[in-house]
């Protein structure tokens, strides 16, 4: 287990907003009565950067952000099981470039939705319990990973329907996995975190032939030789409670727990001994009233800023890459009082969306400086 060395004091950001960017509410939608757990912009396909999807209840909805705060509904997928509750949705695409949405939740079934036809392209059964997060490999957007309550992370090829790898076993998570992320440039690397209070970094390098094989597999997906990855290359105890969101920022990791802050840290591996190493905590970004679990943050395309909501309906926008951290903006509206489960920053960060426990979606737009 990675230890934190003494003498390296992290830089803590000040909660005084810098007024660098000013945002205002330009729209508010009431999608339904059920909580909305996920909202996500499409960063996979530059033709659709202004499209976003939401997931809540048994519904996945696609919208478009237009000028002047307008939000247009493009399509809606309603699951046949009315008791399904989607917790996560991710944009992906088929190898021919068709935009797909990949959603999962309470039932543990992954639905791959073809946004062109609004029909299910494939359904993946394999997880033994609910799915907390799905993420897409940006360099190969027909690969997705899913993090589950069943204590595992799975890698899927959505084109062929194959479960390629299962990250679980002797060195795996010991409780629900809440979040997972692909490294932005190292195609072999993922990070996962969860209710065992750890962040684990995994490598697919020695299993990459199976990933390649999954693209050309012609037999039944169930006959594919799915491999278990039992040991992570690094385990970090950065937090003392549930870790419900982790994202790579280059080779650093930004993660959050239920203790009112985001933490930016660097995993320092020992090459000889997998799993060992040290953690250098670089920076902390305070987020008041962010002490309930399943509140996740998002970043713009270039990871310049991170936006995170709290249980009181406020959003904190931090400049991630400045030191000390700079609070870009603190967004609050008199009618926004419900816990914000997830935010979505647009490609350049000029629009921020959030989805709430009360079934609302809020849109904030940057105010052009005069």
Image (spheres, helix red, strand yellow):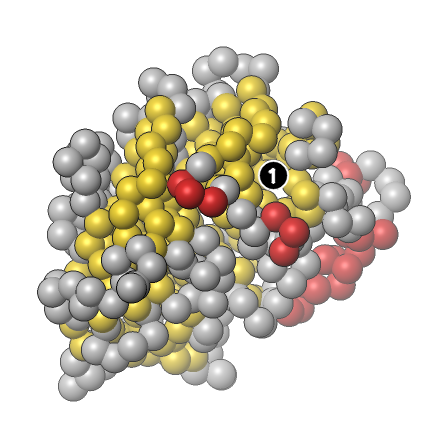
State the SS at label 1: strand
* Residue drawn at the location 56% of the way across and 20% of the way down: 78
* Residue drawn at the location 25% of the way across and 58% of the way down: 22
Residue to which mark 1 is pinned: 101
Figure disc tally: 1
| Quarter of the image where the C terminus is located | bottom left
Q: Would residue 63 be visible to someone looking at this image? A: yes
The x and y percentages for residue 321 are: 34, 74
* Residue drawn at the location 53% of the way across and 39% of the way down: 64
The x and y percentages for residue 174 are: 38, 48
Residue extending farthest to the bottom is 7
Which quarter of the picture shows residue 261?
A: bottom left
In the image, 248 versus 55, the foreground residue is 55
Label 1 packing within 10 angstroms: few (<14), some (14-19), many (20+): many
Residue extending farthest to the right is 218
In the image, 212 versus 291, the foreground residue is 291
| Quarter of the image where the N terminus is located | bottom left
Residue 302, compared with residue 67, is above or below; it is below
* Residue drawn at the location 44% of the way across and 37% of the way down: 70
Residue 167, compared with residue 150, is above or below; it is below
The x and y percentages for residue 184 are: 54, 67
Residue 85, compared with residue 220, is above or below; it is above
Residue 58 appears left or right of 21: right
Q: Would residue 318 be visible to someone looking at this image? A: no
In the image, 32 versus 133, the foreground residue is 32
The x and y percentages for residue 198 are: 33, 58
């Amino acid at each position: 287990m990675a230890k934190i060395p003494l003498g390296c004091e992290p830089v803590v950001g000040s909660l005084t907003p810098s007024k660098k960017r000013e945002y205002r509410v330009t729209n508010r939608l009431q999608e339904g009565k059920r909580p909305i757990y996920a909202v996500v912009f499409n960063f996979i396909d530059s033709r659709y950067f202004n499209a976003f999807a939401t997931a809540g209840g048994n519904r996945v909805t696609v919208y478009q952000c237009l000028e002047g705060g307008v939000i247009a509904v493009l399509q809606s997928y309603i699951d046949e099981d009315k008791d399904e509750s989607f917790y996560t949705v991710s944009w992906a695409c088929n190898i021919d470039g068709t935009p797909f949405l990949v959603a999962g939740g309470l039932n543990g079934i992954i639905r791959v939705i073809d946004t062109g036809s609004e029909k299910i392209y494939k359904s993946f059964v394999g997880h033994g319990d609910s799915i907390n997060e799905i993420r897409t490999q940006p360099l190969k957007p027909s690969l997705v990973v899913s993090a589950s309550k069943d204590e595992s992370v799975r890698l899927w090829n959505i084109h062929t329907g194959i479960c390629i790898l299962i990250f679980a076993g002797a060195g795996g998570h010991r409780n629900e996995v809440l979040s997972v992320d692909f490294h932005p440039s190292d195609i072999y690397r993922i990070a996962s975190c969860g209710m065992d209070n750890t962040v684990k970094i995994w490598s697919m390098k020695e299993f990459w032939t199976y990933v390649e094989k999954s693209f050309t597999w012609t037999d039944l997906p169930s006959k594919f030789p799915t491999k278990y990855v039992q040991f992570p290359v690094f385990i970090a105890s950065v937090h003392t409670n549930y870790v419900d969101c982790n994202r790579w920022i280059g080779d650093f990791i930004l993660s959050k727990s239920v203790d009112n802050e985001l933490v930016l840290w660097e995993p320092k591996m020992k090459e000889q001994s997998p799993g060992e190493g040290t953690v250098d905590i670089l920076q902390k970004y305070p987020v008041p009233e962010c002490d309930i679990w399943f509140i996740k943050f998002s970043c713009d395309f270039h990871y310049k800023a991170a936006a995170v909501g709290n249980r009181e309906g406020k959003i904190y926008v931090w400049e991630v890459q400045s030191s000390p951290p700079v609070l870009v903006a603190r967004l609050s509206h008199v009618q926004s009082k419900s816990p914000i489960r997830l935010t979505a920053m647009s490609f350049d960060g000029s629009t921020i969306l959030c989805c709430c426990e009360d079934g609302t979606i809020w849109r904030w737009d940057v105010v052009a400086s005069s």
